[in-house]
């Protein structure tokens, strides 16, 4: 009997360790969430390209999202601010853990892999 209790504790410790590893602060989000974030950005009519997307876990329920985006031509500076606010609010509404969203508007060339 003692062996089975020890086995259960070992399995529990392993599972807790694996779950904790998935929530490590400083780690990037999982690939599925990353794809969803890129897809959400690319569906915005004002965005021509997502040149780079970086993510980092800041805590159990907090994620930093930093995106380098290329906007469609002809958008004036006031419109850029409106678009940025709308995108941030939409991301926070869909992914509440994405509570730190930074958009860098650039004319960067496309980056392979996005």
Image: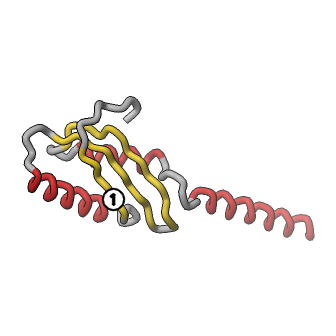
Query: Few, some or many C-alpha atoms within 10 Å of disc 1 (few <14, some 14-19, many ≥20)?
Result: some
User: For residue 19, what is the image quadrant?
Assistant: bottom right
Residue 53 locus on image (x, y percent): 38, 45
Residue 112 locus on image (x, y percent): 38, 29
* Left-right relation of 105 to 97: left
Indicate the secondary structure of the residue bearing disc 1: strand
Residue 102 vertical position relative to residue 35 in the rendered view, above or below:
below
Q: Residue at x 80, y 67 (%)?
A: 9
The quadrant in which the C terminus is found is top left
Which of 106/36 is in front?
106
Q: Residue at x 85, y 69 (%)?
A: 5
User: For residue 21, what is the image quadrant?
Assistant: bottom right
Residue 16 vertical position relative to residue 50 in the rendered view, above or below:
below
Q: What sort of colour scheme is used for the picture?
A: secondary structure
* Left-right relation of 24 to 31: right
* Left-right relation of 22 to 36: right
Q: Residue at x 28, y 52 (%)?
A: 103
Residue 44 locus on image (x, y percent): 19, 46
Q: Residue at x 22, y 44 (%)?
A: 43
Residue 41 vertical position relative to residue 24 in the rendered view, above or below:
above
Number of labels in the image equals 1
Residue 73 vertical position relative to residue 5 in the rendered view, above or below:
above
Tell me the residue that label 1 is attached to: 101
Residue 23 locus on image (x, y percent): 56, 61
The quadrant in which the N terminus is found is bottom right
């Amino acid at each position: 009997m003692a062996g089975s209790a020890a086995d259960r504790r070992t399995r529990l410790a392993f599972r807790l360790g694996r779950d904790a590893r998935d929530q490590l602060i400083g780690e990037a989000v999982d690939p599925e969430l990353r794809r969803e974030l890129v897809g959400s950005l690319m569906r915005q009519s004002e965005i021509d390209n997502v040149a780079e997307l970086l993510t980092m876990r800041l805590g159990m329920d907090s994620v930093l999202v930093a995106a380098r985006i290329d906007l469609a031509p002809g958008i004036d500076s006031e419109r850029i601010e409106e678009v940025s606010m709308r995108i941030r609010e939409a991301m926070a509404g869909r992914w509440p853990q994405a509570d730190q969203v930074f958009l860098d508007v650039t004319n960067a060339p496309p980056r392979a892999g996005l």
